[in-house]
């Protein structure tokens, strides 16, 4: 069995990949990761080695200051020609307009795209590479999310948030002296995105038991290693120590590779990500700008820990669960969906008709599996999840937001997101387990009570 958790990046990135005992082939198209203090100065040699003659540098005004200007002078000194485009807008939204901007300004003599930035700039450059067939070299400027090494772009298309499979960078350059100087909110966002993996892996393993869904223990172990690297570095990270930043960036890249390896988002996204997806969708619907992905996900992680915490002392009740599922009213549910998702309810109602998440017969079958494997499910929860107080200490160390009201999310929006999380994909997560057990209403009340108290205490 390949022991991904203990491999070096060079081993993980070998071109022939790995045939795993889980039955899948694991590999990614990232070929080189250059990480450490001051590694940006090695760019001329790196470009030469990769045969890159004239890169197209893409940045925005912030990342130009953070790294772009320095990269340009390094290339100038080495006599390497390049094309460039700097987004004039204050904040780049990853949409059709931004993809159009980088495309229309692409000098035809350039042979590679060089993304200088974090989330949005990378996502947009990946789209340009998908469309043009050019290869991508990414120079990261902030440890803000785990998408550096992934092969998808998180985009806004026709005003709707979508994930589009695009390309994975061929080379990633992560200069930790540069990344350590990113805004603290971005550093916190990266930590939030990575501690989320406690929940993602737990949800994934539970679905494997209940639904027989594909699962790979080697990838799960890779994710655990990624989280540990980050959590253990919290103190140095809070002080912007480049070595601690390096550990977190490695965790983020490992996490992105875990996704690419599994070919599904399971290793990196569970109910905690769904809180964020729904808050984001609701913000777009209301014409508001959502908070950073990893900040929302970090808050979501603590919410899900509260739910699993309570579930540990639960005694499942077959009759209660069956009665709850029998009371499901499709028409009433459709009315609620229209209210919560005014712009995407048709699609989501069609999803329910297709996969029948709330169908009583399918529910009864799942319920029997849950009851039969209850001890095993509880062992997974014990194995995977940290004590909430311990994780909260990590959050406090780096000033990471912990409660919904710290990021402008109300109790009502938190409750709605818990219910709505069952509906946006066909993915079995903690909220669906609670629904199956007939406990979703009780747990929603419990969650909101707990959050309300914690928010009041935090203000006192
Ligand atoms: Zn595997
Ligand atoms: Zn994420």
Image: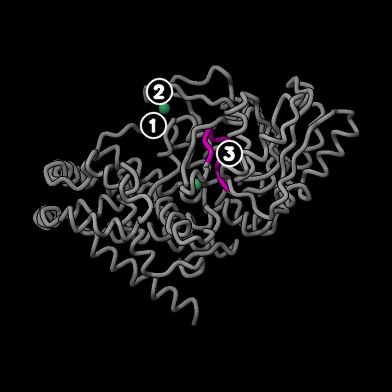
Please name the residue that numbered disc 3 is placed on.
253
Quadrant of ligand 1: it is: top left
Query: If you read the primary sequence from the N terminus, does the residue marked by circle 2 or circle 3 appear first?
Result: 2
Does mark 3's beta carbon lie closer than 8 Å to ligand 2? no
Q: Which residues are magenta?
A: 145-153
> How packed is label 1: few (under 14 Cα within 10 Å), some, or many (20 or more)?
some
Q: CA distance from mark 1 to mark 2?
A: 9 Å
For the point 44% across and 57% down, the residue is: 285
Please name the residue that numbered disc 2 is placed on.
24
Q: How far from the left and from the top, in percent, is residue 151? A: 53, 32
Q: How far from the left and from the top, in percent, is residue 323? A: 10, 56
Against 38, residue 430 (above or below) is: below
Q: 423 and 193: which one is in front?
A: 423
Q: CA distance from mark 2 to mark 3?
A: 21 Å
Q: Which of the two marks, 1 or 2, is nearer to us in this view?
A: 2
Image quarter for residue 355? top left
Does the segment drawn in magenta span residue 152?
Answer: yes
Q: Residue furthest top?
A: 16
Q: How far from the left and from the top, in percent, is residue 1? A: 43, 23
Does mark 1's beta carbon lie closer than 8 Å to ligand 1? yes
Helix, strand or loop at label 2? It is loop
Residue 164 lies left or right of residue 271; in this view the side is right
Dot label at residue 216: 1
Q: Residue furthest bottom?
A: 460
For the point 52% across and 48% down, the residue is: 194
> How packed is label 3: few (under 14 Cα within 10 Å), some, or many (20 or more)?
many
> How packed is label 2: few (under 14 Cα within 10 Å), some, or many (20 or more)?
some
Helix, strand or loop at label 1? It is loop
């Amino acid at each position: 069995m390949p022991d991904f958790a203990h491999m070096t990046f060079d081993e993980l990135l070998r071109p022939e990949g790995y045939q795993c005992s889980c039955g899948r082939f694991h590999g990614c198209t990232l070929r080189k990761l250059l990480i450490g203090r001051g590694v940006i100065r090695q760019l001329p040699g790196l470009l030469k080695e990769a045969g890159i003659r004239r890169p197209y540098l893409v940045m925005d005004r912030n990342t130009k200051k953070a790294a772009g200007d320095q990269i340009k002078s390094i290339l100038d000194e080495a006599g390497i020609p390049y094309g460039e485009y700097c987004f004039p807008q204050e904040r780049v939204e990853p949409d059709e307009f931004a993809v159009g901007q980088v495309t229309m300004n692409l000098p035809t003599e350039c042979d590679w795209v060089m993304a200088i930035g974090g989330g949005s700039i990378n996502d947009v450059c990946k789209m340009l590479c998908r469309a043009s067939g050019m290869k991508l070299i990414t120079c990261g400027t902030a440890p803000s999310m785990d998408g550096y090494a992934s092969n998808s772009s998180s985009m806004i298309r026709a005003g709707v948030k979508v994930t589009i499979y695009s390309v994975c960078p061929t080379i990633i350059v992560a200069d930790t002296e540069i990344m350590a100087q990113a805004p603290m909110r971005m550093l916190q966002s990266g930590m939030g995105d990575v501690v989320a993996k406690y929940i993602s892996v737990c949800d994934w393993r539970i679905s494997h038991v209940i639904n027989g869904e594909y699962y790979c223990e080697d990838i799960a172990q890779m994710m655990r290693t990624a989280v540990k690297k980050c959590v253990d570095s919290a103190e140095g990270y809070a002080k912007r120590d480049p070595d601690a930043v390096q550990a977190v960036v490695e965790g983020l890249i490992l996490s992105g590779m875990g996704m690419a390896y599994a070919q599904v988002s399971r290793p990196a996204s569970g109910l905690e990500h769904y809180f964020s997806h729904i808050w984001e969708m609701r913000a777009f619907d209301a014409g508001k700008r959502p908070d950073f992905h990893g900040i929302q996900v970090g808050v979501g992680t603590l919410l899900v820990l509260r739910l699993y915490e309570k579930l540990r002392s639960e005694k499942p009740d077959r009759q209660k669960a069956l009665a709850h599922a029998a009371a499901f009213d499709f028409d009433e549910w459709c009315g609620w969906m229209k209210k919560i998702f005014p712009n995407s309810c048709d699609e989501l109602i069609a999803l329910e008709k297709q996969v029948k998440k709330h169908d009583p017969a399918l529910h009864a079958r799942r319920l029997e599996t849950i009851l039969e494997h209850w001890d095993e499910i509880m062992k997974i929860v014990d194995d995977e999840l940290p004590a909430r107080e311990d994780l909260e200490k990590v959050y406090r160390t780096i000033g990471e937001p912990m409660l919904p009201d710290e990021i402008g999310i109300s109790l009502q929006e938190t409750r709605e997101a818990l219910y709505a999380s069952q509906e946006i994909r066909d993915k079995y997560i903690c909220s669906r387990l609670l629904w199956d057990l007939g406990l979703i209403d009780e747990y929603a009340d419990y969650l909101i009570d707990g959050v309300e108290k914690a928010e009041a205490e935090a203000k006192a």
